[in-house]
Amino acid sequence: MDALVAALEAEKFKPTVLRAVYSAEEQTYSRNVRTFMNHHNAWLRAAQHEGYTLVCEGDYVPCKGLASFPTFWPSDDPMAWGYLYQGSPRLLALIGREKYLCCHTSPLVAYVVNARVAQALCDWFDAEMSARDPRDYFSFDALLQWSAMGRGCHAFMPMKHYGEHGGKANPEHGAHGMRRAGEHRADNLAGPLHFLPQYCEGSRLAYVSARLKERLYGLARLATNKWMVRTNVYPYGISDRLEMAAVGLRRLLF
């Protein structure tokens, strides 16, 4: 956590660390639900602020130059939000003349929300927590974006990840049959990282190996038609599909 805070401060951000404190009852909740609660606490704060709030988990490793990277969502959309890091992203559409990448992804390692989006996520949290047993495993991050979309929110991603997921997978994911046991990494990066990710355990070779492995994994997803997904919200034709495929190839090769 100290390395992340130092990196964000070096980028001229003013980070606030939210440390979770659970009641005796909440300690019986599944690990993933407790993570859900942690994000909810961040959304409550973001809903009280103007502009966008960066929310990131403790294992986020930002790229150097993060603060100078371009905005990757349409500024005229009050319900737009964005994932700085994705993890097996899927492209839904290219939006506007700028061709912003409207996407679906799951991990909430690092993302930005404004007050309206944060409030929509808070409303969804309340609905889910009242309908579920919090002691049961709930892959909330996989459902979050579809639910947010139903509330009028539109998620976007940059051409290259603005950082890496530096931690190891939650064991609950593997125990519940999640693909790759829940492990996910960036398939490209917008620049060098501020520090070596935790999963490397101090090995530069492990980092280089992970970069190659994830790049190949990204290309495999593109080749097996897992880069794009069609929805009734963003219909597209053959020419759109070709353009979206070209974007997927370009982000991995250049």
Image (spheres, helix red, strand yellow):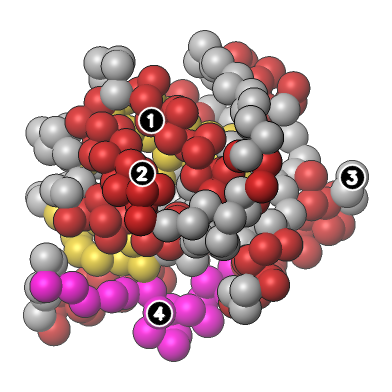
Q: Quadrant of the N terminus?
A: top right
Please tell me in which quadrant of the rendered image residue 250 appears: bottom left
Residue at the location (50% across, 61% down)?
Answer: 139
The kind of residue on which mark 2 rests is Phe
Q: Secondary structure at mark 3?
A: loop
Q: Nearer the viewer, residue 54 or 127?
A: 127
The CA distance from mark 2 to mark 4 is 28 Å
Indicate which disc residue 202 carries.
Answer: 3
| Of callouts 3 and 1, the N-terminal one | 1
Q: Position of residue 89 (x, y in %)?
A: 42, 63
| Of callouts 3 and 2, the N-terminal one | 2
Residue mark closest to the camera, 3 vs 2: 2
The kind of residue on which mark 3 rests is Gly
Q: Position of residue 190 (x, y in %)?
A: 51, 45
Query: Which residue range is magenta in the image?
Result: 215-232
The CA distance from mark 3 to mark 2 is 37 Å
The CA distance from mark 1 to mark 4 is 30 Å
Residue at the location (72% across, 48% down)?
Answer: 167
The CA distance from mark 3 to mark 4 is 32 Å
- Judging by the rendered image, the residue that carries numbered circle 2 is 125
| Of callouts 3 and 4, the N-terminal one | 3
Contact, mark 3 vs mark 1 (Cβ under 8 Å): no
The kind of residue on which mark 1 rests is Trp
Left or right of residue 67: residue 238: left
Left or right of residue 211: residue 105: left
